[in-house]
């Protein structure tokens, strides 16, 4: 039995609210691939790889960008419906299945919208299909294309004659390449795209019908659990297989190199086996002390990059009227998905299917093939949604676990990680140290800005060939990508501010081309990557949130030194008009009162309030935002409570304003949780923050602030990413609001009550000393 | 192994397994329900929440043998896609989800507190939600949906 794209096309066009991945894609079937081509050859240059019209007129679209809660399913459905002039419920979107969808790499990095909503890929395919249908209709109706109209899956001529898409091409191939000249429908005519269409998964989610990867069940499926090392760097000395033989339902203990897993008939039996299995571990490598870790980061050999260097920074700083210096510290943080990761694999002798919540189905296919020793084209990875991942959570690792255990069992195996498995071993968001120096001249302008960053790194996304970049692949025997120390080369190409290592206020001039968002022309940005004791990987706004925290808080320090209003001082040093518009819009919506921070005459007790601002051009060109935060700070307890956020956001042409608002609200609050609470904790051997009591997060009883969002919809501009823009501002804007409220500058995240009270004590004793 | 009978969403099921098996695994593996989900296995997040005897229960830590004869209600037991329960409808109307993994905890906890005390204040609802985690931080929409449901319930 096989499944092909034709089978998808035969099914009815009604939007399926509650489909089963295992039913839709029969578990023992193997894909013959699109239109009988090889399954690894979904050619993205061919229209048929993206769009098909079924015999009932239903449009099926295939995408390599998936929905993990950010709304990508709904908004891509809107895009296809809009371009093809059919109602939403006549579009069926198949996302991220390596047997039928094109390889679009990884769904990450705020790249789905720029990739699929402008003039390439899915958007280009949909526009090509629309023009092809018009051309076909022109031929069939004998009327010029220019006088045909398209609506509701029907093309109508001036004569009143009509022809349906199904009549034109139903269940046949287009046999066309993607057209490089196909025109998108103009935003002024959009009726579906750009509208606040409710997310298509809502009803299934709210009524408990939606299938997550945790719910995938296939016949004869067994249950697996893993046994991770008790310490970082620990290796297997021996495994006592007999220690679990009394457990009913036990199928197998599997050991490969330092990977240990168990398989049982039922999930609870697997849990028992994993707990009771006696494994003798060789001691680990030990961990550096957390207390001095950030200090030690700066002394490590590093892989360096010089983004921009005007060569006159030292000279200009020496001539400055005053120089401000500060060091910022950002901890390791977790993705901390609400569900511990899960995957199901069905590995046969000659083929395998993996149901996975990975962001990267094609890379995962390649990794699984490598682990199993199967040819690439014999492995199929089907995306099924997991809990929100916010980047590289445990989904890739558990997919490898499930594949290996299923191969060992010769049967389908579902692996559920425990909370500890997930939290002790996921790829954390990188710890960073950022050193800032800037000089102020007469007239209170910034003369020079020097920024040097250190980020800890180990492993990362496995990509197509590096399973060792996550824990499972490493335990199975592959090595993670390590930092290769090397000095920085001179900046050769133009500034690409992908990680927001460069502050918004520098001109960013390299070889005469200035890509920065600001005006400061004496500038240097040097980055260092150092070895991390823990796996690291992209976590929503990777390095961007860390760097922006340091830049925007440091800008506030410069404002304070200049005794300038933080909005006016920012505007004075910005050149990018879209960012300027965001700053102005956020300040206006927040009814920003122009004055320097902190407010003079701060009370010494009770609760104080204040406001701050921050802004960013995400990744240097992938979205513009400014936010104002209002907070209260309890001077006795040190508790910070955000009261109100006002956000202005420009992400070009907006595809779905409701989805965008949902992402922005969630981003601000997730950023608040990260700014106020979240931090990975470890001892001399292992990570100790491995559950929700030891790794802090805001819960639903959190007194949620008001969030007001101004959307700047530039329908004439390319669509940018938007899922990571608002969160990037949260730690910075909260830090600045705390400074305004309480006169303390917090340079280390998270802003815990202990850190707030310590800073208050330090400021009080400085003030007392100043009196004498 | 022992035979255990339990009533879930109005249907009687008999399962044969170790009596200490957590209820969650019975609901998801034996009965095939999708509402309650494994979040932490430690009663810290709420993803596995069900209602039993009017109380919210963390099914990941409750042995199936402790359930007894009383009916268990899961998220899918409240309403159907065709006819959602009013609190589910309120969540649909407000678009109160991102990934949606946590919804059993959010919706059932809010429903249970309002069933017990229809006039519960925002603070009381907030306190009840104190052990419920949403890592997409869809807080504002969720609280708005709960308030609207509570308001409509009173009216």
Image (cartoon, rainbow, N blue to C red):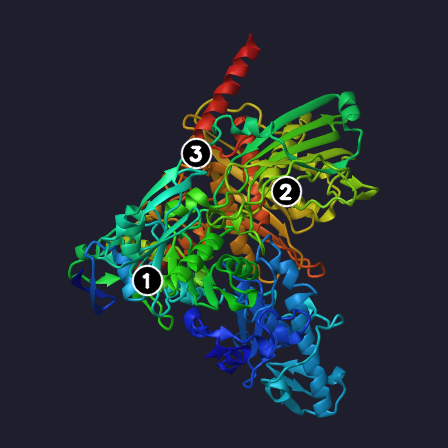
Query: In what element is the residue under mark 1?
Result: helix
Chain letter for the residue marked with disc 2 in the picture: A
B67 to the left or right of A533: left
Residue bearing the label numbered 1: B75
| CA neighbours of label 2 inside 10 A, class few (<14), some (14 to 19), many (20+) | many
Q: Which mark is residue A682?
A: 3
Going from N to C along the chain, the mark reached first, 3 or 2, is 2
| CA neighbours of label 1 inside 10 A, class few (<14), some (14 to 19), many (20+) | many
* Whether label 1 touches label 2, CB < 8 Å: no
Which of A421 and A328 lies nearest the eye of the viewer? A421
Cα gap from disc 1 to disc 3, whole angstroms: 37 Å
Question: Is label 1 or label 2 in front?
Answer: 1
Where in the figure is residue B41, as x and y percent of width and height?
32, 50
Which residue is rendered at x = 67% and y = 77% of the image? A130
Q: Which mark is residue A615?
A: 2
Where in the figure is residue B108, as x and y percent of width and height?
31, 57
Q: Which mark is residue A319?
A: none
Chain letter for the residue marked with disc 3 in the picture: A
């Amino acid at each position: 039995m096989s499944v092909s794209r034709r089978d998808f096309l035969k099914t009815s066009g009604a939007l399926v609210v509650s489909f089963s991945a295992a039913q839709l894609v029969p578990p023992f079937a193997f894909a013959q691939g699109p239109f009988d081509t090889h399954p690894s050859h979904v050619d993205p240059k061919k229209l048929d790889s993206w769009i098909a019209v079924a015999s009932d007129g239903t449009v099926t679209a295939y995408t390599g960008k998936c929905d993990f809660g950010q709304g990508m399913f709904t908004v891509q459905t809107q895009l296809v419906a809009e371009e093809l002039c059919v109602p939403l419920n006549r579009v069926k979107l198949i996302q991220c299945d390596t047997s039928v969808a094109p390889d679009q790499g990884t769904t990450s990095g705020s790249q789905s919208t720029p990739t699929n909503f402008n003039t390439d890929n899915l958007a280009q395919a949909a526009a090509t299909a629309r023009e092809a249908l018009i051309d076909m209709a022109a031929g069939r109706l004998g009327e010029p294309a220019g006088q045909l109209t398209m609506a509701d899956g029907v093309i109508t001529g001036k004569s009143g004659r009509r022809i349906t898409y199904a009549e034109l091409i139903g269940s046949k191939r287009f046999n066309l390449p993607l057209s490089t000249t196909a025109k998108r429908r103009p935003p002024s005519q959009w009726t579906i795209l750009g509208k606040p269409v409710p997310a298509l998964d809502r009803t299934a989610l709210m009524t408990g019908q939606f299938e997550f990867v945790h719910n995938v069940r296939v016949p004869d499926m067994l249950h697996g659990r893993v046994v991770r090392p008790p310490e970082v760097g620990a290796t297997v000395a021996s495994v006592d297989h007999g220690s679990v033989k009394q457990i009913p339902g036990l199928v197998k203990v599997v050991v490969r190199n330092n990977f240990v897993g168990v398989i049982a008939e039922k999930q609870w039996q697997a849990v028992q086996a994993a707990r009771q299995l006696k494994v003798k571990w060789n001691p680990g490598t030990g961990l550096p002390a957390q207390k001095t870790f950030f200090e030690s980061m700066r002394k490590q050999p590093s892989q360096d990059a010089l983004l921009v260097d005007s060569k006159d920074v030292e000279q200009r700083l020496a001539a400055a009227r005053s120089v401000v210096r500060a060091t910022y510290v950002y901890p390791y943080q977790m993705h901390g998905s609400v569900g511990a990761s899960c995957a199901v694999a069905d590995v046969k002798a000659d083929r395998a299917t993996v149901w996975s919540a990975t962001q990267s189905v094609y890379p995962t296919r390649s990794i699984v093939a490598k682990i199993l020793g199967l040819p690439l084209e014999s492995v199929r990875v089907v995306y099924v949604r997991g809990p929100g991942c916010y980047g590289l959570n445990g989904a890739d690792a558990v997919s490898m676990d499930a594949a290996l255990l299923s191969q060992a069992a010769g049967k389908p195996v579902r692996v559920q990680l425990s909370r500890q498995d997930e939290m002790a071993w996921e790829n954390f968001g990188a710890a960073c140290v950022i050193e800032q120096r800037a000089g102020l001249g007469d007239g209170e302008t910034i003369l020079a800005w020097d920024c040097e960053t250190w980020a800890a790194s180990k492993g990362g996304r496995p990509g197509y060939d590096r399973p060792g970049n996550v824990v499972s692949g490493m335990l199975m025997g592959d090595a993670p990508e390590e930092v290769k120390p090397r000095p920085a080369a001179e900046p050769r190409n133009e500034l690409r501010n992908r990680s927001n290592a460069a502050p918004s206020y520098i001109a960013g001039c390299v070889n005469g081309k200035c890509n920065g968002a600001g005006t400061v022309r004496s500038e240097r940005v040097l980055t260092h990557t150092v070895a991390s004791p823990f796996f690291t990987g992209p976590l929503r706004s990777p390095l961007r949130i860390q760097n922006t925290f340091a830049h925007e808080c440091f800008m506030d320090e410069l404002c304070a030194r200049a005794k300038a209003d933080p909005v006016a001082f920012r505007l004075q040093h910005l050149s990018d008009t879209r960012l300027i518009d965001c700053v102005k819009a956020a300040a206006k919506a927040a009814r920003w009162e122009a004055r320097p921070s902190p407010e003079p005459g701060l009370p010494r007790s009770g609760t104080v309030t204040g406001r701050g601002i921050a802004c960013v051009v995400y990744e240097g060109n992938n979205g513009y935002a400014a936010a104002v935060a209002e907070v209260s700070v309890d001077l006795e307890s040190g508790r910070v409570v955000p009261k109100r956020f006002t956000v202005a956001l420009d992400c070009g042409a907006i595809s779905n304003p409701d989805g965008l608002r949902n992402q922005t609200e969630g981003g601000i609050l997730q950023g608040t949780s990260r700014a106020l609470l979240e931090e990975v904790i470890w001892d001399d051997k292992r990570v100790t923050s491995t559950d929700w009591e030891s790794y802090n997060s805001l819960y639903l009883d959190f007194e949620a602030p008001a969030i007001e969002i101004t959307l700047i919809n530039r329908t004439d501009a390319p669509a940018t990413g938007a899922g990571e823009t608002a969160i990037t501002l949260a730690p910075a804007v909260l830090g600045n609001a705390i400074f305004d409220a309480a006169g303390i500058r917090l340079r280390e995240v998270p802003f815990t009550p202990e850190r707030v009270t310590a800073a208050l004590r330090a400021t009080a004793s400085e003030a007392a000393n100043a009196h004498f | 192994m022992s035979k255990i009978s339990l009533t879930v969403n109005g249907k009687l099921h008999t399962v044969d397994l170790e009596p200490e098996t957590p209820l969650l695994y019975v609901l998801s593996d034996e009965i095939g329900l999708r509402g309650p989900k494994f979040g932490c296995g430690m009663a810290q997040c709420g993803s596995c929440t069900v209602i039993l005897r009017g109380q919210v229960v963390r099914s990941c830590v409750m042995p199936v043998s402790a359930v007894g004869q009383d009916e268990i209600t899961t998220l899918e037991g409240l309403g159907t896609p065709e006819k959602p329960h009013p609190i589910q409808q309120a969540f649909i109307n407000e678009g109160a989800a991102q990934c949606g993994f946590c919804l059993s905890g959010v919706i059932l906890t809010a429903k249970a507190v309002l069933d017990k005390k229809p006039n519960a204040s925002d603070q009381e609802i907030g306190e009840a939600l104190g052990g419920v985690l949403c890592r997409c931080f869809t807080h504002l929409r969720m609280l708005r949906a709960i308030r609207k449901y509570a308001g409509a319930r009173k009216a």
